[in-house]
Image (cartoon, helix red, strand yellow):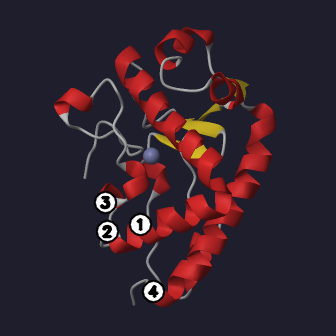
Amino acid sequence: MALSQQHLPQLILHAAGWVRRLHDALYPTATPLPEQFSPLFAPFFAPSTLARIRLLLVPEIPNPDFYPALQAQGLPVPLDFRVMAGLTLIDTVLISQSRADFSGPLLASLLFHEGVHVVQYEHLGLDRFMTEYVLGWASADQRYEGIPLESRPTPWNHASRQSPRCRSQSSRP
Ligand SMILES: [Zn+2]
């Protein structure tokens, strides 16, 4: 059995609830964006956005807590977050210690990508962000690569026409 249109409203609700809970649990331990990134990001982000962003290194990005319930119904999980290099929860950016590339330019590119998600959350709010994310995923044949909210380029790799990835930078599907 595959995830179909009828599952999407529940998926949106569950995903938004998971992001809210995980955000609220992790925000107190996250830290502001390191000063070294300010000159790079200042031309592209509002000062208020840069001031709001929080960062947290985690061993790996966790999968949503409702995945076991999906699997118990014989349904596939939508995306495997454990292989992703980063994940943004509203204003809190999780960076995977096992999947992110910590060399300077790639880390800056990943942080920029996640910063764009912070702006998307600012503009849309959690519920609309998740609605657009899940519907975008569903209309892109349930592929991460086709999600419109994931397709914004960074200024640094625009010339190479490669869009940034939440997914591991070393293992693209
Ligand atoms: Zn992303």
Q: Earlier in the sequence, mark 1 or mark 4?
A: 4
The percent coordinates of residue 86 (x first, y second) are 49, 40
Tag 2 near tag 1, CB within 8 Å = yes
Tag 1 near tag 3, CB within 8 Å = yes
User: Which secondary structure, mark 3?
Assistant: helix
The percent coordinates of residue 47 (x first, y second) are 64, 22
Does 160 appear above or below 78?
A: above
Q: Earlier in the sequence, mark 2 or mark 3?
A: 2
Give the quadrant of residue 129.
Answer: bottom right
**Looking at the picture, which amino acid does disc 1 mark?**
Gly
Query: Residue beneath label 2, please?
Result: 140
Pick whichever, 143 or 132, lies toward us. Answer: 132
Tag 2 near tag 3, CB within 8 Å = yes
Tag 1 near tag 4, CB within 8 Å = no
Query: Disc 4 beta carbon < 8 A from ligand 1?
Result: no
Pick whichever, 168 or 90, lies toward us. Answer: 90
Q: Image quadrant for the N terminus? A: bottom left
User: Mark 2 and mark 4: span between their CA atoms?
Assistant: 13 Å
User: Which secondary structure, mark 1?
Assistant: helix
User: Mark 1 and mark 3: span between their CA atoms?
Assistant: 7 Å
Decide: few, some or many residues near mark 2? Use Cα within 10 Å; few <14, some 14-19, many ≥20: some
Q: Earlier in the sequence, mark 4 or mark 3?
A: 4
**Looking at the picture, which amino acid does disc 4 mark?**
Gln
Decide: few, some or many residues near mark 4? Use Cα within 10 Å; few <14, some 14-19, many ≥20: few
Query: Residue beneath label 1, please?
Result: 136
